[in-house]
């Protein structure tokens, strides 16, 4: 409804006519106030208008839902056939009077239909019903939206006079009011349906904070029926979980910003306390004060549940369901704080199963997993409800007991654990004995910081292992000495790499039949500035634990390839370069780096061999093996199983590995040929390896007798001090220069 519809009183309109117009408006508004049906009011508007203009009929056309066609809604004096002919009129620039008025959003006065182009298409209808003039006024509702037209059709040609114009104006204005009323009602209805059916609970309170309206979701979530809630204050839903401070903030935010949004705990009628997301908004009255508050809330119990699950997952070990390292750290920190306040003691126990690796390796991971689960249960049942039992990973567990009296009470608990664990477990028909070694540190005697307590307990656990396993050991300060040494070593290793303290020695391998030099193995040496030559067995484990092995291993490969390329360039082309590969290197992507090394050094990958040990299989989820297999197929390098016989892999398992050669561990060679057992084992290994299509190398060959035995047993290659110790690169160059060395001596042993 725009201002154009309320033009100020036109001086050209005579008094009696003005009276008529006012009467017209009064009648119409009365019907609206009495809430008469729309169609009835629209028909009355037409009849009242016709009564004021002789020789004419009135009509109201409205746009249909699609807003593309006009339908006659009220035309009480127009014959049915004429209505039918006009129905479906499409608004446009030449669509008669009404179609044009709606299209142009302005009044259209056609004074002579027969001569007006806008009526050209409707001449038939006009003639049939003697329509001579037609004045049409667009009907607008709120937002200036045109929804239809109000028209007067005359049976004579004439232009509208000011009264006619005012009448059309008033008629369309009144029709607009009626139609707007309908639209509002429809909106309210829709809003009401939405209100009732939305998933969120809604509660409306008045200025006195009394509940005046709630929806179905409110009833469902809170458990209160509308009639129980209405008239009450929202305190009805209070859980008591929020303190005075919360409500202070709440009301402050509502007062200042007119809204509050957040999480709140409420209580259902049945007493359950539940979390909800709540949004409260103030509805301001004309004077700006809050006359109502509308609260919309969602029950987020489910969300909370999944949050809890996520939390559980992040803080617990999936296998045993015990707290993980993360949660252990948090708990230990709290325990220390409490113990500090209450001046009590804590015992931290580091528990490691004895020879768990054996079980895993020989009986498989599933049995290992089930054993760990049983251990977790036994640990839990050995301590108080509120003590912490955590799993750090592998077979490592930690128990934290608070409020212990002295070292002896800690000892009793640890002994109970050892006792419970030592009861045999039957898993998949196998009876297993899971003994454990326990290291104990005490707060505040041994340390006050959580980290240090754990480190001390760990050190004590190693002590217990060293003392023969299946026992407990208390932390003793001397233990830290060993740990300090390790830390020093780690630091030295890093420095060593930077300072070029590492070098390679090479040990040759010979063909057992013709004595040809068939391979050289690169062996890492560390020239420590203070300690002198450090053997690899001392520093490689530290490099593995600290991750330094990745860097170190790459350095070895690169250096060895570069050196071996020099030998090739000197004309020695048919030897293999062997390099030891730590399983830790396979846990990272080392293939990319390797490709780069081959590319840069120019050493051909098919003459390169990695020596791996069976420990590779321990704890591998398959990805290490896959990488190894990919290296072989993609790069074409060779793989040898080193130290064969010391681990737990059987010959049949070897079929699964991408290897081409076996290296029998030195410990089997050592006592040859006198030790009957070793002799039998070595013969069997060689025989079966050949059956599997694998070559066999013997390492640690020190005596002629060992060599003779191995040659007779069809061992393919020999490596050992007898024919060549690990030596600097220059010495190998000499050796290669000499060609097929010791051919005769090897041969005549046959
Ligand atoms: P390994 O791969 O089994 O190497 C053979 C070891 O046996 C070498 O010890 C070698 O000096 C020694 N050996 C060779 N022949 C004889 C013999 O006739 N009698 C005796 N008693 N010993 C012999 P080394 O150089 O001390 O290396 C020890 C281990 O350290 C190696 O065992 C290997 O596992 C590891 N290692 C050495 N270099 C590297 C490396 O670059 N990377 C990795 N990951 N490990 C390496
Ligand atoms: Mg080796
Ligand atoms: Mg070896």
Image: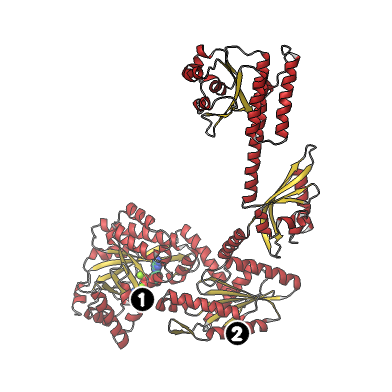
Residue 614, by quadrant, is bottom left
Quadrant location, ligand no. 3: bottom left
Placement of 362 over or under 135, stated as above or below:
below
Find residue 643 and report its horizontal and vertical position in percent: 35, 74
Which residue position is annotated with label 2?
A: 416
- Image check: 577 left or right of 146? left
* Quadrant for the N terminus in the image: top right
Q: Is residue 718 something that shows in the picture?
A: yes
**Of label 2 and label 1, which has the lower sequence position?**
2
- Density class for disc 1 (Cα within 10 Å; few <14, some 14-19, many ≥20) is some
Label 2 and label 1: CA atoms lie apart by: 35 Å
Which residue position is annotated with label 1?
A: 649
* Quadrant for the C terminus in the image: bottom left
The one nearer the camera, 217 or 463, is 217
Placement of 587 over or under 27, stated as above or below:
below
The one nearer the camera, 278 or 387, is 278
Find residue 666 and report its horizontal and vertical position in percent: 34, 77
Find residue 457 and report its horizontal and vertical position in percent: 60, 75
Find residue 22 and report its horizontal and vertical position in percent: 74, 22
């Amino acid at each position: 409804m725009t201002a154009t519809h309320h033009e100020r009183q036109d001086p050209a309109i005579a008094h009696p006519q003005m009276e008529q117009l006012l009467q017209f408006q009064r009648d119409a508004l009365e019907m609206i106030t009495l809430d008469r049906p729309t169609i009835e009011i629209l028909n009355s508007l037409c009849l009242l208008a016709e009564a004021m203009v002789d020789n004419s009929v009135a009509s109201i056309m409205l746009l249909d839902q699609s807003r593309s066609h006009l339908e006659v809604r009220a035309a009480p004096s127009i014959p049915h056939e004429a209505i039918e002919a006009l129905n479906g009129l499409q608004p446009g620039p030449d669509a008669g009077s009404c179609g044009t008025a709606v299209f142009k959003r302005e009044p259209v006065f056609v004074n002579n239909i027969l001569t007006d182009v806008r009526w050209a298409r409707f001449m038939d209808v006009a003639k049939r019903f003697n329509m001579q003039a037609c004045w049409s006024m667009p009907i607008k509702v709120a937002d200036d939206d045109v929804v239809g037209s109000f028209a007067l059709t005359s049976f004579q040609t004439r232009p509208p006079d000011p009264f006619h114009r005012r009448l059309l104006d008033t008629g369309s204005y009144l029709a607009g009011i009626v139609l707007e009323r309908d639209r509002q009602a429809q909106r309210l209805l829709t809003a009401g349906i939405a209100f009732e059916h939305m998933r969120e609970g809604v509660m409306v309170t008045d200025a006195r904070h009394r509940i005046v309206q709630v929806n179905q979701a409110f009833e469902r979530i809170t458990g209160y029926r509308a009639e129980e809630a209405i008239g009450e204050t929202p305190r009805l839903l209070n859980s008591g979980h929020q303190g005075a401070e919360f409500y202070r903030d709440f009301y402050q935010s509502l007062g200042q910003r007119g809204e509050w949004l957040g999480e709140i705990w409420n209580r259902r009628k049945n007493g359950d306390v539940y979390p909800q997301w709540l949004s409260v908004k103030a509805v301001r009255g004309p004077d700006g004060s809050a006359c109502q508050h509308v609260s919309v809330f969602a029950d987020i119990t489910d969300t909370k549940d999944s949050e809890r699950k996520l939390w559980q997952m992040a803080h617990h070990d999936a296998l045993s369901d015990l707290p993980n390292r993360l949660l252990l750290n948090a708990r230990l920190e709290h325990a220390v704080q409490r113990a500090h306040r209450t001046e009590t003691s804590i015992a931290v126990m580091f528990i490691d199963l004895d020879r768990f690796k054996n079980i895993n390796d020989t009986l498989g991971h599933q049995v290992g997993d089930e054993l760990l689960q049983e251990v977790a249960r036994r640990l839990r049942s050995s301590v108080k409800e509120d003590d912490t039992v955590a799993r750090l990973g592998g077979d490592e567990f930690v128990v934290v007991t608070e409020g212990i009296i002295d070292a002896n009470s800690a000892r009793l608990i640890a002994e109970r654990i050892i006792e419970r664990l030592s009861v045999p477990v039957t898993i998949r028909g196998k009876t297993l004995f899971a003994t454990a070694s326990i290291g104990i540190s005490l707060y505040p005697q041994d340390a006050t910081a959580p980290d240090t307590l754990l480190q001390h307990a760990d050190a004590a656990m190693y002590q217990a292992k060293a003392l023969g396993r299946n026992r407990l050991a208390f932390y003793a300060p001397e233990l830290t000495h060993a740990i300090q040494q390790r830390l020093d070593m780690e630091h030295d290793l890093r420095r060593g790499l930077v300072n070029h303290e590492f070098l390679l020695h090479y040990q040759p391998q010979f063909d057992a039949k013709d004595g040809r030099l068939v391979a050289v193995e690169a062996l890492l040496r560390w020239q420590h500035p203070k300690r002198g030559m450090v053997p690899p067995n001392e520093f490689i484990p530290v490099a593995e634990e600290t991750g330094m092995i990745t860097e170190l291993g790459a350095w070895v490969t690169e250096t060895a390839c570069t050196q071996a390329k020099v030998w090739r360039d000197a004309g020695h082309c048919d030897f293999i370069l062997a390099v030891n590969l730590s399983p830790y290197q396979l846990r990272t992507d080392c293939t990319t780096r390797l490709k780069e090394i081959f590319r840069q050094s120019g050493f051909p990958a098919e003459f390169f061999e990695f020596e791996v040990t069976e420990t590779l299989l321990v704890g591998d989820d398959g990805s290490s093996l896959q990488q190894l297999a990919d290296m072989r197929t993609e790069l074409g390098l060779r793989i040898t199983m080193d130290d064969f016989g010391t681990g737990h892999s059987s010959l049949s398992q070897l079929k699964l590995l991408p290897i081409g050669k076996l290296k029998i561990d030195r410990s089997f060679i050592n006592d040859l040929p006198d030790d009957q057992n070793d002799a039998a084992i070595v013969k069997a290994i060689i025989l079966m390896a050949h059956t599997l299509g694998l070559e066999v190398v013997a390492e640690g060959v020190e005596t002629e007798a060992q060599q003779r035995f191995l040659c007779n047993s069809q061992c393919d290659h020999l490596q050992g001090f007898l024919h060549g110790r690990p030596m600097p690169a220059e010495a190998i160059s000499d050796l290669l220069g000499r060609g097929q060395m010791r051919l005769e001596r090897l041969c005549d042993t046959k």
